[in-house]
Image: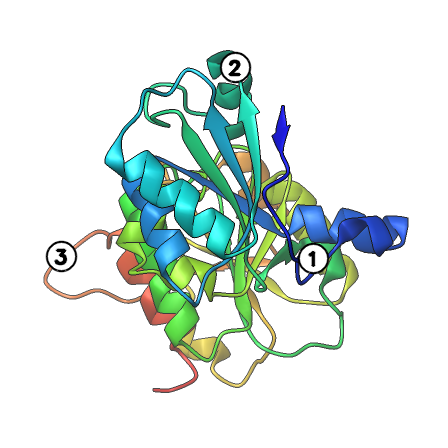
């Protein structure tokens, strides 16, 4: 059910777009959930909210009133849903607290939109499931000279309030290219002529040996198991970050930071 509370036209009206532009617009939306995260997003002028979703079973509460008031003031479309339908939007019925918000993230876009001529390193993840690690990876990539982060929608943690918090808000600023799977990304990026390196502590080649190469793709694997065999086979080669004192591996977020800033050192 729609509550047409907006008196002003929104900055962007998808109805006026071509099919391709409309698809790209909706692909670039992120959905966050939970009463406090949604309230903070609506209070931030850096966040561009698009659509607010509320459960029609929500009981009256000060925070709901504040959220609704802010949404009205910012000309955000408000929709009411059954709790079941809302859970389909939030993808987390246990923690959405009857509220979700679609926000525009300019840096969030499908990988197929990446221009093959764009230079810079890319960080590609393979089954990185810990939200804290993903948030810290996003923060490092956002602050680095790297072109961006490639995030599969299957097998990796989703961008949710936990990830946004761990990223210190940079998840809404970082260039994040999403794709379906890690191997679909390696296929597309290989077609663009990019060299793909998997991070592995067992490799004989060190990252310093490719210091002169630009526009590389670095694939970082699961926190416990590393790269899956399928993804490892899709890489052109494997490299390692040399470690001292018999340390076998680094946390994936630390490894991502070192790789993202490799051109600086």
Identify residue for label 2: 82
Choose mark 2 or mark 3, whichever is in front. Answer: 2
Choose mark 1 or mark 3, whichever is in front. Answer: 1
Which of the two labelled residues, at mark 2 and mark 3, occupies the earlier sequence position?
2
The disc at residue 202 is none
Identify residue for label 1: 9
Q: Is residue 39 left or right of residue 24?
A: left
Secondary structure state at the residue bearing disc 3: loop
Which of the two labelled residues, at mark 1 and mark 3, occupies the earlier sequence position?
1
Q: Quadrant of residue 67?
A: top left
Q: At 52% across and 15% down in the image, what residue appears? A: 82
Q: Is residue 31 above or below residue 205?
A: above
Instruction: Specify the farthest residue to the right.
Output: 18
Q: Are marks 2 and 3 in contact (CB under 8 Å)?
A: no
Q: At 47% across and 29% down in the image, what residue appears? A: 54
* Residue sitting nearer the eye, 124 or 244: 124
Q: Is residue 70 left or right of residue 231?
A: left
Q: Is residue 28 left or right of residue 44?
A: right
The disc at residue 246 is 3
Choose mark 1 or mark 2, whichever is in front. Answer: 1
On the image, the x and y values in percent for residue 75 come to 56, 53
On the image, the x and y values in percent for residue 106 come to 59, 64
């Amino acid at each position: 059910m729609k509550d047409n509370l907006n008196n002003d036209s929104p900055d962007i009206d998808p109805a006026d777009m071509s099919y391709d532009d409309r698809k790209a617009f909706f692909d670039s939306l992120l959905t966050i959930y939970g009463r406090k995260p949604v309230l903070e997003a609506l209070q931030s002028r850096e966040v561009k909210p698009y659509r607010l979703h509320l459960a029609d079973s929500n009981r009256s509460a000060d925070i709901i009133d504040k959220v609704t008031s802010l949404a009205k003031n910012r000309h955000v479309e408000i929709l009411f849903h059954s709790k079941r339908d809302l859970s389909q939007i939030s993808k987390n019925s246990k923690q959405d607290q009857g509220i979700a918000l679609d926000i525009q993230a300019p840096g969030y876009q499908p990988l197929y939109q990446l221009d093959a001529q764009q230079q810079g390193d890319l960080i590609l993840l393979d089954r990185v499931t810990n939200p804290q690690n993903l948030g810290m990876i996003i923060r490092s990539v956002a602050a680095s000279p790297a072109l961006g982060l490639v995030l599969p929608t299957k097998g990796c943690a989703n961008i949710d309030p936990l990830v946004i918090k761990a990223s210190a808000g940079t998840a809404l600023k970082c260039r994040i290219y999403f794709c379906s799977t890690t191997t679909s990304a390696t296929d597309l990026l290989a077609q663009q002529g990019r060299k793909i390196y998997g991070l592995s502590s067992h490799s004989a080649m060190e990252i310093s040996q490719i210091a002169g190469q630009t526009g590389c793709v670095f694939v970082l694997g699961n926190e416990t198991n590393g790269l899956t065999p399928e993804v490892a086979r899709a890489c052109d080669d494997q490299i390692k970050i040399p470690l001292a004192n018999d340390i076998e591996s680094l946390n994936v977020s630390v490894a991502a930071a070192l790789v993202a800033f490799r051109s600086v050192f």
